[in-house]
Amino acid sequence: MKRMERQTGNTSTAMHDETVLIRRILDGQTALFRQLAGRYAEQVLQMVARLIPSPEEAEEVTQDVLIEAYKCLSRFDSRQATFQTWLMRIAYHTALKHYRQHHRHVRTVDMEQQWLDSIPDDETDALLDDTDRLSFMERAIEMLKPDDQMLLSLYYFDDRSIHDIASITDHPEGYLRSRLQWIRKRLAITIKSLESNENK
């Protein structure tokens, strides 16, 4: 499983522009929030949809995220994070809360730590990078706990830095690095198990 590359633009100019826009919104030009939120609404929807596959439900949660962001806009601090990262933090926590409230029936698999420690890193890489196993990979990801699914999405599919993910999830960077390694091994073992059951 390799990280996707992401194109970046002139972030300092964008941040200044957004700071001015936020100040105007807080000064009473509330209609401008639609313009600000519109820049990232699709990214929010994509993040939410990875955890909540129903399009209607994902759209509803996305709207909840944007409403919450509008209500909390006065607490945004550009010295701590970009507006995009701050918004994704709200999306992350809102999507997880919704998932836990409405999708408790989803099956997950518990594994002993010794099983995870027993699989070598090179074997893990081979399993996760094998395109012939994509269907098993998708099923294995669905069997992860929602927190781990979101972490995987942020790091591999959104190509976010560990620093950004720490801001979004409220987890320390050291924990995130070890958790990502743990998730990779867990996926590899689940893929092997699914493959074995399929061949019986």
Image (tube, rainbow, N blue to C red):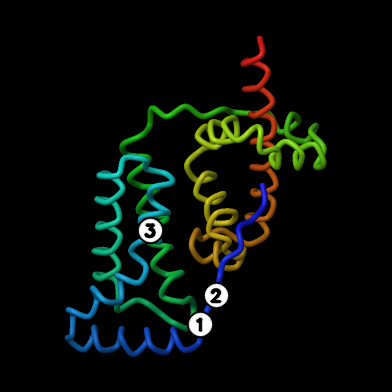
For badge 2, the amino acid type reads Thr
Q: Is residue 176 left or right of residue 123?
A: left
Q: Residue at the location (38% across, 88% down)? A: 17
- Identify the residue at horizontal 57%, vertical 66% (top origin): 6
Q: Which residue is mark 2?
A: 8
Circle 1 — which element? helix
Tell me: 57 left or right of 113: left
In this rendering, is residue 186 above or below 50? Answer: above
Q: Secondary structure at mark 3?
A: helix
> Disc 1, disc 2: CB below 8 Å?
yes
Write down the residue under mark 3: 91
Front one among 74 and 1 = 1
| Residue 74 image offset from top left, x and y in percent | 29, 79
Indicate which disc, 3 or 1, sits on the residue closer to the N terminus: 1
Residue closer to the observer: 121 or 101: 121
Residue sitting at 37 percent across and 50 percent down?
95
Q: Quadrant of residue 7?
A: bottom right
- Nearer to us of marks 3 and 2 is 2
Which mark, residue 11?
1
Question: Looking at the image, do the residues carrying marks 3 and 2 touch, with CB atoms under 8 Å apart?
Answer: no
The correct choice, above or below, for 62 with respect to 192 in the image is: below
Please tell me whether residue 77 is drawn above or below residue 195 in the rendered image: below
Hey, which quadrant is residue 163 in on the image?
Answer: bottom right
Dot in front, 1 or 2: 2
Of residue 130 and residue 147, the one placed in the foreground of this image is: 130
Q: Amino acid at mark 3?
A: Ala
Q: Position of residue 3 (x, y in %)?
A: 64, 56
Q: CA distance from mark 3 to mark 1?
A: 21 Å
In the depicted structure, whether residue 134 falls above or below residue 92: above
